[in-house]
Every structure is written in C-alpha cells, then in structure tokens.
Image (tube, helix red, strand yellow):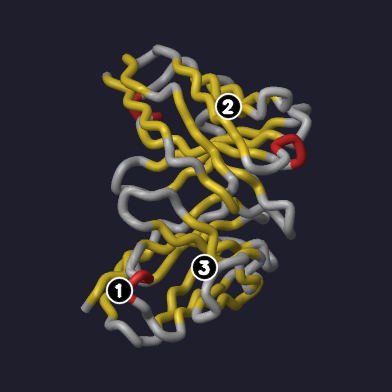
Amino acid sequence: DIQMTQSPSSLSASVGDRVTITCRASQGISIYLNWYQQKPGKAPKLLMFSASSLQSGVPSRFSGSGSGTDFTLTISSLQPEDFATYYCQQSFHTPYTFGQGTKLDIK
Amino acid sequence: EVQLVESGGGLVQTGGSLRLSCAASGFTFSTHWMHWVRQVPGRGLVWVSRINSDGSRTTYADSENGRFTISRDNAKNTLYLQMNSLRPEDTGVYYCVRDSLVGATSFDSWGQGALVTVSS
C-alpha cells in the first residue's frame, strides 16, 4: 500500500496568515493527489484534485502543487472558517490511502 | 443538490452482520462510481471499497476483502455495503462517497455518515 505522510500533524496560526501543509507519498503517484477539509462533526469536503485543480466552489485562497512524491496545500490568507483538519489522499492505486491529517487551529 | 443519506448503522457483536444503505439524489447516480470510506471517531480516514457505475466491478481494501460486499441498485439510486464477520476494528463512521466525473478518482460528495459499533 502507498503510505501518505502529512506534516505538520498540527499547526497554530492566525487569521490572515499564509499556511502550507505538506504531504509525502511512499512512492511516486504522479499528480494523483487530492486534498480534503473536515470540520468537527462534519463529513470531509473536497478542496483540490489532481494536485493543483481547485474544486468548484472552493475559494481561490486555496492552492495545491507538487507531483511524484511531494505535495503542498497552501492557504494564502487564513479566514476564520478555515480552521479545520486537512487530509491528503492518493488516487494513484487502490487501496486509496489518506494522510493522518493536519489539524489547523487558532493561535 | 447532491444528497447522499446513509442508514443501517448500529451496535452489533463481534461476528455479527450489518447492511448499510445509501440513498442518492440530486444527480445521475448510474453514471458515477461510488465508494465507502470509514473514519474511527477522532481518527483518520480509511478507504473501504468501490464499485463502478453499472455494478459489474468491485474493489476492496485487504482487511475487508471476503467479509464485506459492495453493491448498487441503479433503478433505486441506492448503494449498499453488506458487512459480515464484523470485528471491533471495523468500528467507525461509514461514509457513502461519490467519485467525481472530472479527472482521476476524487471524492466530491459525502454523506453524513452511519455509525457502526462492534462490541467485543
């Protein structure tokens, strides 16, 4: 199975900050990498697909990059509604696997 | 509006069975691959199974292979997960998830989840 490792596991930041979360795959996955946001008590929500494509309806302050084994999710200017847990997920090969999550909270 | 509504969760003893259902609406169900994803409360996400649009192909995670069966009824716009020989480690919230039609596999719509608790 492909292992996905996110860093950091948790992050404290302030409204207006620029934040970057990284995701590393245990083997090359081309651009088959998706990002999700999950708020407490809610289902995950798709933010980015194919590493750098913004899902419809997602604010443009979110961006993604990377290919192969190393990927990043960047939030250019944190808004209050962005405090949540973020997961990466590879869709290169089944079993599809997720990172362990990055919890973003208010400093 | 896309809606996925799971039902059938509950408390079951080790070795027991449950069948989850997911009623889909607001989109053309028969054109989308569908998945089940599990989340242990307070923990991460685990992909469980997928089924293609016409139900002819299925794939499972190793730990579920042989115990779980995914199926669908496109006439009823419903996805199913039959879970047999349940173990405590199967405990979690099971999400019914739609696969996007754009690009490679991504999970673009999720249900609210059904809680399955397996007691030892």
Q: Which of A96 and B115 is in front in this view?
A: B115
* Label number found at residue B65: 2
Alpha carbon separation for disc pair 3 and 2: 27 Å
Disc 2 chain ID: B
Label 1 sits on residue: A11
Label 3 sits on residue: A24
Residue A20 percent location from the top left of the image: 43, 80
Question: Which amino acid type corresponds to the residue marked 1 in the rendered image?
Answer: Leu
* Label number found at residue B15: none
Alpha carbon separation for disc pair 1 and 2: 36 Å
Q: In this view, does B87 lie above or below A1?
A: above
Residue B87 percent location from the top left of the image: 38, 23
- Marks 3/2 in contact by CB < 8 Å: the verdict is no
Q: Is residue B25 above or below residue A31?
A: above
Residue at the extreme left: A107
Question: Which amino acid type corresponds to the residue marked 3 in the rendered image?
Answer: Arg
Residue B96 percent location from the top left of the image: 53, 37
Taking the image as shown, residue B89 lies to the left or right of residue A96, namely left
> Circle 1 sits in a helix, a strand or a loop, which is it?
strand
> Circle 2 sits in a helix, a strand or a loop, which is it?
loop
- Residue beneath the point at 54% across and 20% down: B82
Residue A78 percent location from the top left of the image: 37, 80
Alpha carbon separation for disc pair 3 and 1: 17 Å
Taking the image as shown, residue A87 lies to the left or right of residue A51, namely left
